[in-house]
């Protein structure tokens, strides 16, 4: 509080009972030296009665007040309060009733009378403070000029809101005057060091908070009023949820709340720690915006607010659940309330306001109100529920208990019961019985918790009815305190299921939670598991890797064995088989043709033995590609490359031999050269054999050192196991291919040299051509082989084998077959030598 704000208070409390003087720079010098009490206070009690002992009462008889002028240069004007609250008025009447009952009781305080001074705090802390000071002071100067002969103030009953109670408690504390609150539940007031004189007949909010946690909602919206009550409740909730769950809460600025949480939030459960007075404008906005589907959870402050029971509220507030403080029975209350009317209290402004609020008419002509006049003798009935609701008093019952607690304490004090001395201590030990309920305080001045679980259900007239669906009894052993009859609860939207309020819906198996940065743990995204990982539970935090040889299924919910793939007799395998068999058959057919015509010129000229060798090797080449199909075994792996390389080597050696022969035959015709002598059948065989032998040696070394073997390749595609033959030694593999390449190049060069030699049927041309094709095929093969994935590498190799074999077969034998079969007339030595006469 700023010093400026303090001045008017000192001013208005001109009589501090203990000091007699007022220290204020703005008061007149005369006042500073005054030795008599000069009561400057104009704050008058709403109800007052004298007695041997006086109890103060502070009630929020109005909802709010106009901000007082704190200028401090003149005497503060009287407080102007707005919005008469019949409910609080009823509480005040209950206090009067209790005092009167005690005064009439022959057993409780038989020789003493109690008096009361009831003030209006206008639900405003500053006015509550004024009221507290007014309670401390005498009523007027005339009453007690020397501050003597005033009945001692026993205790103060008040205040309603915790924010006001805190202020009042601080005022009363120096005087050691106890106060008992009937509605202030803030956990902050439990602090004995800060509020040593504070007692209450309402449980502390920690219990409500603990109950909220038991509903197992992980994501709720929170609305709180901007006062200690709201702040501490939210703080308590946060503390309670720490580490386990998180609540997103919105600052009390309602405008923010509306825009942010209600409209867009997935939190369908909204907990409200606020009083009905401040809730009303907020709810009106909420209804105008037509937002529905919110499950409200009401704090004790508004769970039994009769202002919200109208039909129009049902669609928005139906299903609300909350914690109602203990109700009791006050047998004489209804009758007592009915005795209050303007006729009986003609000077009491509050009674007139009650009439204005209940009947909409003004019982007094002098009040200057715009309402139509009425007699003031109208009878109070049940339907004036804001005031006459006496069927299950809760707060009023607390007021009643508080008065009795004070009376019993005083009674005990007179009897010299334990802790005698100051009444403060007596409070801690007082126990008594009202309406079958044992009332006592714990060592912190709190009362033993008891709550009704209240559910807002539709009444017969479409209005809202408060239905009891359970209770919380703090006297029961831990774990048994809360009893809820879930089947009796009607949730928001007329549902019988507990509403779901989560920030993010559960993640299904096959996905995992991914917490959003900077957001509470219950807010997450669901990320599908990666390939090869699975999660088989809802809300998994992690996806787990599948074991080796296993892979995730399509939904990522289970690991299944990986698919094993190899070149098999599927469409590709069948195509390869057909082509290779076809090639082999074709070669055999050529073989047959040659064999049949082995005595004709063209066969004989072209060195029939070498031709047969070539055809034989080619047949093997074609068949070689078959070894690449089927599941790789250690035998088939070894066979694959060796068989292919040896047959090809054989084939090209034969062609090389042939080239040499052609070259030799033609150069031999030149004078002086007798090369043919060096290239007889034996030599030819020798060349073929030795050339093939080199390849055989390489292959043997390969097989001995690091033979190709079947291997499981999981690198290329992790979801599959590709069965392939690893080459073992890649050096050997490239040597084998290199050797074939070398032979082919050599052959090509020789044939190229011989291509222009005379004669109609110069084979060198065809050999050149065939080698060209052969080299082209294998040059294309290398990059294709290296880049082909897994099992396709095998297919690429077999296709290369088939293509080159076909190339050789066609280039070398097609022209000859053409002549043999279709142009037999050209199949003569003369024609072949180009010496045929035209
Ligand atoms: N239990 C609430 C409190 O301790 C009750 C209450 C009474 C209240 N008047 C209020 C809450 C005004 C907020 C505002 O404060």
Image (cartoon, rainbow, N blue to C red):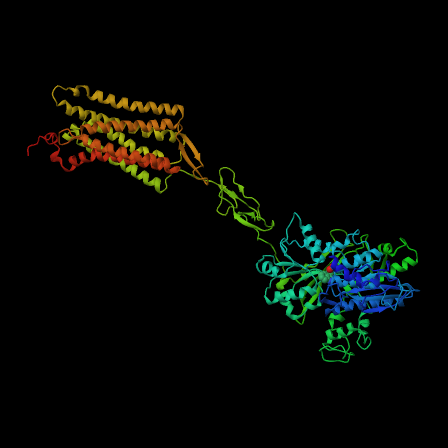
In what quadrant of the picture does the N terminus appear? bottom right
Q: Is residue 182 visible?
A: no
Name the outermost residue toward the left. Answer: 838
The tally of labels here is 0
**In the figure, residue 746 lies in which quadrant?**
top left
**Front-lying residue, 30 or 177:** 30
**Front-lying residue, 61 or 435:** 61
Give the image location of residue 497, x and y in percent: 63, 59
Q: Residue at x 82, y 76 (%)?
A: 344
**Front-lying residue, 720 or 172:** 172
Give the image location of residue 420, x and y in percent: 90, 54
In what quadrant of the picture does the C terminus appear? top left
Could you tell whether 767 is left or right of 531 in the image? left
Could you tell whether 189 is left or right of 308 in the image? right
Could you tell whether 753 is left or right of 576 in the image? left
Give the image location of residue 601, x and y in percent: 14, 30
Q: Quadrant of ligand 1?
A: bottom right
Q: Is residue 8 above or below residue 344?
A: above
Give the image location of residue 160, x and y in percent: 76, 62
Name the outermost residue toward the front. Answer: 29
Q: Is residue 630 above or below residue 224?
A: above
**In the figure, residue 110 lies in which quadrant?**
bottom right
Q: Is residue 423 visible?
A: yes
Could you tell whether 168 is left or right of 748 in the image? right
**In the figure, residue 809 lies in which quadrant?**
top left
């Amino acid at each position: 509080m700023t010093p400026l704000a303090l001045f008017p208070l000192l001013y208005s409390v001109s009589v501090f009972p203990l000091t007699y003087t007022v220290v204020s720079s703005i008061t007149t010098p005369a006042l500073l030296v005054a030795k008599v009490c000069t009561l400057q206070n104009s704050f008058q009690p709403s109800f007052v009665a004298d007695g041997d002992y006086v109890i103060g009462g502070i009630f929020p008889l109005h909802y709010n007040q106009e901000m007082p002028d704190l200028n401090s240069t003149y005497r503060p004007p009287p407080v102007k309060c707005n919005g008469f609250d019949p409910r609080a008025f009823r509480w005040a009447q209950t206090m009067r009733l209790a005092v009167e009952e005690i005064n009439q009781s022959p057993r409780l305080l038989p020789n003493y009378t109690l008096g009361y001074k009831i003030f209006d705090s206008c639900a405003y802390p500053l006015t509550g403070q004024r009221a507290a000071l007014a309670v401390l002071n005498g009523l007027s100067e005339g009453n007690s000029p020397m501050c003597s002969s005033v009945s001692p103030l026993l205790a103060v009953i008040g205040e309603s809101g915790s924010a006001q109670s805190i202020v009042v408690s601080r005022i009363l504390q120096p005087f050691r005057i106890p106060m008992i609150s009937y509605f202030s539940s803030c956990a902050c007031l439990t602090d004995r060091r800060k509020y040593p004189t504070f007692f209450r007949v309402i449980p502390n909010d920690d219990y409500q908070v603990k109950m909220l946690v038991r509903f197992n909602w992980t994501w709720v919206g929170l609305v709180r009023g901007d006062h200690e009550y709201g702040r501490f409740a939210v703080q308590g909730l946060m503390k309670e949820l720490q580490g386990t769950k998180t609540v997103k809460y919105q600052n009390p600025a309602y405008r923010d709340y509306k825009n942010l949480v209600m409209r867009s939030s997935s939190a369908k459960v909204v907990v409200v720690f606020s009083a009905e007075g401040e809730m009303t404008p907020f709810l009106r906005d909420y209804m105008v915006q037509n937002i529905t589907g919110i499950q409200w959870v009401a704090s004790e402050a508004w769970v039994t607010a009769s202002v919200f029971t109208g039909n129009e509220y049902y669609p928005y507030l139906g299903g609300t659940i909350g914690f109602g403080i203990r109700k009791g029975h006050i047998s004489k209350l209804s009758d007592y309330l009915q005795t209050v009317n303007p006729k009986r209290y003609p000077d009491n402004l509050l009674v007139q306001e009650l009439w204005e609020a209940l009947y909409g008419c003004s019982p007094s002509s002098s009040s200057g109100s715009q309402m139509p006049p009425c007699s003031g003798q109208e009878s109070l009935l049940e339907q004036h529920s804001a005031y006459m609701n006496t069927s299950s008093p809760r707060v009023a019952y607390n007021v009643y208990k508080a008065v009795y607690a004070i009376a019993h304490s005083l009674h005990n004090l007179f009897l010299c019961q334990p802790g005698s001395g100051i009444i403060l201590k007596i409070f801690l030990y007082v126990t008594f019985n009202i309406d079958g309920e044992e009332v006592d305080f714990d060592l912190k001045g709190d009362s033993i918790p008891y709550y009704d679980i209240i559910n807002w259900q539709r009444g017969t007239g479409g209005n809202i009815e408060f239905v009891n669906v359970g209770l919380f009894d703090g006297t029961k052993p831990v774990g048994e305190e809360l009893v809820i009859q879930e089947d009796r609860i009607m949730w928001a939207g007329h549902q019988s299921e507990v509403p779901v309020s989560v920030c993010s819906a559960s993640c299904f198996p096959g996905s995992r939670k991914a917490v959003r940065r900077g957001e509470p743990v219950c807010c997450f995204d669901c990320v599908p598991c990666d390939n090869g990982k699975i999660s088989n539970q809802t809300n998994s935090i992690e996806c787990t890797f599948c074991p080796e040889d296993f892979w995730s299924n399509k939904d990522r919910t289970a690991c299944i064995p990986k698919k094993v793939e190899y070149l098999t007799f599927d469409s590709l395998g069948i195509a390869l088989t057909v082509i290779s068999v076809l090639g082999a058959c074709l070669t055999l057919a050529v073989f047959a043709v040659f064999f049949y015509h082995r005595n004709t010129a063209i066969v004989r000229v072209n060195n029939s033995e070498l031709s047969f060798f070539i055809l034989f090797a080619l047949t093997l080449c074609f068949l070689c590609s078959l070894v690449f199909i089927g599941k790789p075994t250690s035998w088939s792996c070894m066979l694959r490359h060796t068989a292919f390389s040896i047959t090809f080597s054989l084939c090209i050696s034969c062609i090389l031999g042939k080239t040499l022969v052609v070259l030799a035959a033609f150069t031999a015709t030149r004078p002086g050269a007798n090369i043919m002598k060096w290239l007889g059948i034996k030599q030819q065989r020798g060349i073929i054999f030795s050339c093939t032998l080199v390849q055989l040696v390489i292959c043997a070394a390969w097989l001995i050192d690091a033979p190709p073997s079947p291997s499981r390749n999981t690198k290329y595609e992790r979801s599959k196991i590709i069965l392939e033959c690893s080459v073992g030694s890649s050096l050997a593999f490239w040597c084998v291919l290199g050797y074939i390449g070398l032979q082919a190049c050599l052959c090509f060069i020789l044939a190229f040299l011989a291509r222009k030699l005379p004669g109609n049927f110069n084979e060198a041309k065809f050999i050149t051509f065939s080698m060209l094709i052969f080299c082209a095929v294998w040059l294309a093969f290398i990059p294709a082989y290296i880049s082909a994935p897994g099992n396709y590498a095998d297919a690429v190799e077999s296709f290369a084998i088939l293509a080159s074999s076909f190339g050789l077969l066609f280039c070398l034998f097609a022209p000859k077959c053409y002549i043999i079969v279709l142009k037999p007339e050209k199949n003569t030595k003369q024609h072949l030598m180009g010496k045929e006469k035209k």
